[in-house]
Amino acid sequence: MELSDLLTFSTVARLGGITRAADELNTVQSNVTQRVKALEAEIGTALFERHSRGMTLTGAGRRLLPYAQRMAALSREAVIAARDDGEPKGPLSIGSMETTAAVRLPALLADFHRRFPAVRLSLRTSTTAELMAGVLNGSLDGAFVAGPIDHAELSSVVAFQEELVLVTARRWSNLAALRAGTPESGPTVLAFRTGCTYRQRLEQVFTEFGWPSSARFELGTLDGMIGCVAADMGVTLLPRAVVGKNENVSVHTLSAAQSAVETLFITRRTAHPFSALQGFIACLDKGTEVIAA
């Protein structure tokens, strides 16, 4: 079983298609297809179901995936460890919630790039659940997620303190008016896909407001989320720092129990603490001190 075949397989599984996998792997589509077919021939069963919307894993593919991810991650980590001479350089893969990437990370990433220009940093945005999975399977070296996190295989440090606020269209400038002027089911929930911690918090807020059966609408981008709120399509829950002074929406303060959340930076406990990651954590510590001050 070729390691390159397993890496290609896990990339196709994560991205859901040959074209996107070829782009990420910097190769041609025919090469990706050939490697997937070679792996399927060696195992003796189909690993993907092909359809018009892309590719999804078969039962065999789902069983193989965690092993392929661990083997690919271990191979990558071995190369990094062997090359690590104490000078931060080479690849570094970081994950983040989209809200954190939009507001908290630009200054941090710029500082890191100035200090360690030899590091090839890549940033992937996703939900807390998917980011945790990425750190655990080794496809991410670290990630910014919403706390709390309690996992035996993960280490975490507090990166940022956030205040979550309810965001509505401008006409709902008064929260009491919103609660009085909507049906029992409540307004539409605008949220990122399942696995987003802020979505879970918003579900809790709606339950406390007596809106347990509201309609749900998923969006994939922060700009799309705020735009739909401004158009009075529904309401959402976001960090106050993300909304800022946006004049197109109204922001509502919630109780401390509803609003307080920590953004954590997580890493895998057993991962090699290579220099590029240590340099990133040093920049994070420096940035956190500046924000706290």
Image: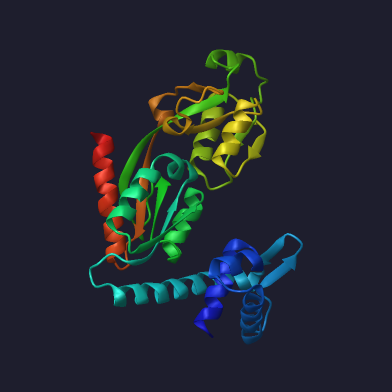
Residue toward you, 194 or 275? 275
In the image, taking residue 164 as reference, residue 250 lies left or right, namely right
Residue drawn at point x = 61 percent, y = 82 percent: 39
Residue nearer the viewer, 247 or 77: 247
Q: How is the image coloured?
A: rainbow
Q: Residue at x 45, y 64 (%)?
A: 139
- Is 53 rendered above or below residue 212? below
Indicate the position of residue 263 as horizontal and vertical percent values. Answer: 38, 43
Q: Would residue 85 appear left or right of 2 to someone viewing this image?
A: left
In this rendering, the answer to whether 6 lies above or below 271 is below
Snapshot quadrant of residue 155: bottom left
Residue 7 at least partly seen: yes
The percent coordinates of residue 205 (x first, y second) are 52, 29
Q: Relative to 147, does residue 166 appear above or below in the rendering?
A: above
User: Residue 160: where, in percent of width, then height?
Assistant: 34, 40
Up-down relation of residue 196 to residue 171 (above or below) = below
Specify whether residue 12 is in view: no
Q: Position of residue 161 (x, y in %)?
A: 34, 36
Instruction: Give the quarter of the image for residue 276.
Output: bottom left
Which of the image's four quarters has the N terminus?
A: bottom right
Q: Residue at x 56, y 74 (%)?
A: 8
Residue 80 horizontal side relative to residue 285, left or right: right
Figure quadrant of the C terminus: top left
Q: Residue at x 47, y 41 (%)?
A: 99
Kindly indicate the quadrant of the structure image that contains residue 280.
bottom left
